[in-house]
Amino acid sequence: MATRLDIDTVSPQLARLARGLKLGANSMLVTLFGDVVAPRPQALWLGSLIHLAAPFGINDRLVRTATFRLAADDWLSATRLGRRSYYGLSEAGLQRVTHAGKRIYAGEAAQWDGRWTLVLVRGDARATLRQQLKRELLWEGFGAIAPGVFAHPRADASSLREILTAAKALDYVAVMEAASLAAFSLEPLQVLMQQTFRLGDVAAAWQALLRRFSPLLDSAAGLAPVDAFFLRALLLHEYRRVLLRDPDLPEVLLPADWPGRTARMMCRDMYTALLDASEDYLHATVETADGPLQGARRELRKRFGAGTARPAGQPAA
């Protein structure tokens, strides 16, 4: 594959979508690694990362600094081949984006059984451990309902055990199940959820995302490859940002007009429409430590619980 350092131009209409957004280098690279690299664990050439980040206003200096910091924080692992540096997800980084991906790319949730998973952190746990657990549990979708008390209505037990094991916290945490008693009203719990999780703020963030991206849904399938990649990455970046603030409450605990439902469907439909053209762009642009970017379309099409066939005449990757 030929080396590419020239920057492809995103159409002005698409470029305007990024106005007013805070696109930090660290968080944007986490989005790219979680969406592009996680399905095919490869190490990307630093020059390719610089190329992919440029349309978002992130220059080469910021990319170099961000990759260094993410490697220091055990998100990325660095490999050097000759004079080139390559970055892939570390074991811990892959675990984090895989856990987050279960929420980001989830399809329709199963019927809630009314049970909660509670995680209670011992009061004598050291401050650094408590902070680490809070960060990892919030990333996993738990809500902090009180100091040292986290709750999730649909927790993945294996993911939770991996988090606690990696943090060496099994001796400092109690994990319990809870359920509402049928004899008592759900209304206080609904109010508590709205207050604890600031559902009004989350709803406003979902509505802002819909206003920004939904006008492009009908035209998404016809975009040029560079525009399709730009829109896919930007959409996922903002969707992830809002979703990780959303407590992922069951329907019975949400307002009837909850905009998160509409936002999830919009993101699913747009991601599906953008997938083939954006993947074509990535395969033409990205260099890895072991050659071309691997094909992952089959796995990517399973995201959001949706799957579409590639148009006739186009080969599957």
Image (cartoon, rainbow, N blue to C red):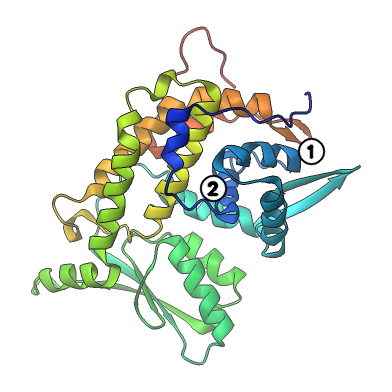
The structure residue drawn at horizontal position 61% and vertical position 52%, both measured from the top left corner, is 94
Dividing the image into 4 quarters, which one contains the N terminus?
top right
The structure residue drawn at horizontal position 46% and vertical position 21%, both measured from the top left corner, is 223
Kind of residue sitting beneath label 2: Thr
In the foreground, 277 or 250: 277
| Disc 2 element | helix
Question: Residue 31 location, x and y as percent?
Answer: 54, 47
Question: Residue 279 location, x and y as percent?
Answer: 56, 27
Q: Which dot marks residue 31?
A: 2
Residue 40 falls in image quadrant: top right
| Disc 1 element | loop
Residue 4 falls in image quadrant: top right
Residue 199 position (above or below residue 268):
below
The disc, 1 or 2, on the residue closer to the chain's N-terminal end is 2
Does residue 73 appear to the left or right of 254 in the view shown? right
In the foreground, 17 or 168: 17
Q: Which dot marks residue 289?
A: 1
Residue 204 falls in image quadrant: bottom left
How crowded pointer 2 is (Cα within 10 Å; few <14, some 14-19, many 20+) is rated as many
